[in-house]
Image (cartoon, grey):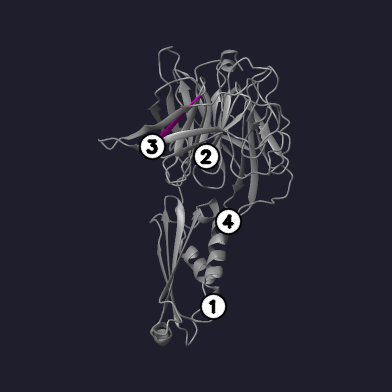
Amino acid sequence: MSRSRALVGFVAVTAFVSLAAGQPPTDTPPDALGAMRAWLRATTATHERDVATVDLQTRWPSHSPDPAGLDAALREALPAPTEGGRTHLQLSARLEDGRVVLELTASATERSWFARFLGLRDAEERHRFEHPLDAPLRRHVAALPALTESTVVQRAFLLPSRDYLALAVTDLGDDGPNELVLLRADGVLEVFRLGSDGRGRTRIFPVAEAPLPDAPRPGLGSPRPFGMLTPDEGSVLVAFRDRDAIFRAHLEGRSLVVEVVDDALCPPGAMPMADACAMPVDARDYFASQLLSRTGLPAPARAPTSFYSRTRRRLHRADGSWGDVEAVVTPRGRLAVRTDARVVGVMGHGSALAMDDVDGDGQVELLASSDGTGPEVLHVFRVRADGGLRALWRSEPLEGSVFVAHAGDLDLDGSPELLAIEEPRDPGGRASLWVVR
């Protein structure tokens, strides 16, 4: 990696639910269809022998490949009607913002009018369930076009400043919309939301900003500033190499509140990631391969090597199986990807790294920057289920440089985007946010 690439900030990209390689899946979340069926069985258990009729109403997108298969699976989870039943079940199912929404109504039939009259039976019960789409469920409904070189779309949004060290997409107020959170090299956090202007054009609008509180400086610095943003339950954890503390930021209305985290999330000097703590190498600008335990989480395995950036994803594949994908960018510019027990790599990449399943097919897409030896280019790879790495797309040469990246659902359409920040070469210029999907 060129020296110029090593003198500006980067983001160590965080992951979703993740596990150490070789460990059994102890915290694997339920699949969408399994969770839906379990909820239906539990919710209707009290009516199992008292159902007169069952009405299923579904609204799936017109391009769904197998909606009938999903409808059949939902019906199987509902009690069968019985003669003499006194309850009518009505289940409606639809998609909202990339989530499956079930609404179940249990109402009394005419046969139970006397019980209703005496107040022994409620006239109606209502229950609601939501779950994000996953790859197995997309085999039935809401299948997305496969990401290919010809279907990749990139958009750029001009940012108000420059010299950004990290970015993240998360809900800072736990109120619905996701925010774009940016950390600048001067220790200031900026928060934005996606929206439309008066002409209906998509824009990012500033919401709030705040400086990080004062904190002691670390004993051994680094040749460049760098930082990390990690989404964490309605807030974001902030770690800044020039501050010997971990901060938590969240929104209260339109005010950004930033506080020092009192709990010991990580050992002293380490920075929190979603599944582990990363320890900066003394007087260097990268992290050691030995990952440390984050409080409350299982002990992580060693990363494939020391790294500038790292991301890890517990992946639900289309066939229902689970896989573990981890990617790092090394100080020598090697992009290394570990899928379960297989590791592959390719040289010539910079510190920007982002990874997610953009097209919902159960395979992750990975965005990486170039190493600065030539014009800056964004690369998108697909990590196949067998661990192979396939080049999908590369951008036209960019005028500036890209050092940080992240993945997240910024527009809340149920499909994540790959995001990167291009820093201008002009000292008076402003950075740009690239959104690739």
Q: Nearer the viewer, mark 1 or mark 4?
A: 1
| 270 left or right of 78 in image | right
Spatial separation of the CA atoms under disc 2 and disc 4: 25 Å
**Helix, strand or loop for disc 2:** loop
Which residue does the image show at 56% across and 47% down from the upper left?
362
Mark 1 Cα shell of 10 Å, populated few (<14), some (14-19), many (≥20): some
Q: Quadrant of the C terminus?
A: top left
Q: Are marks 2 and 1 in contact (CB under 8 Å)?
A: no
User: Is residue 93 positioned above or below 287 on the image?
Assistant: below
Identify the amino acid type marked 2. Answer: Ser
Nearer to me, 135 or 382: 135
Disc 3 from disc 4: Cα separation: 29 Å
Relative to the observer, which residue lies in front, 69 or 264?
A: 264
| Residue on which disc 1 sits | 48
What residue do we see at 64% from left, 40% from top?
325
Q: Which residue carries the number 3 mark?
A: 194
Q: Which stretch appears magenta?
A: 188-192
| Three-letter code, disc 3 | Leu
Instruction: Work out whether mark 1 precedes mark 3 in sequence or the reverse, and give the earlier one.
Output: 1
Q: CA distance from mark 2 to mark 1?
A: 41 Å
Residue to which mark 2 is pinned: 235
Q: Which residue is mark 4?
A: 31
Give the left or right position of residue 43, taking residue 93 as reference.
right
Tell me if residue 153 can be seen.
Answer: no
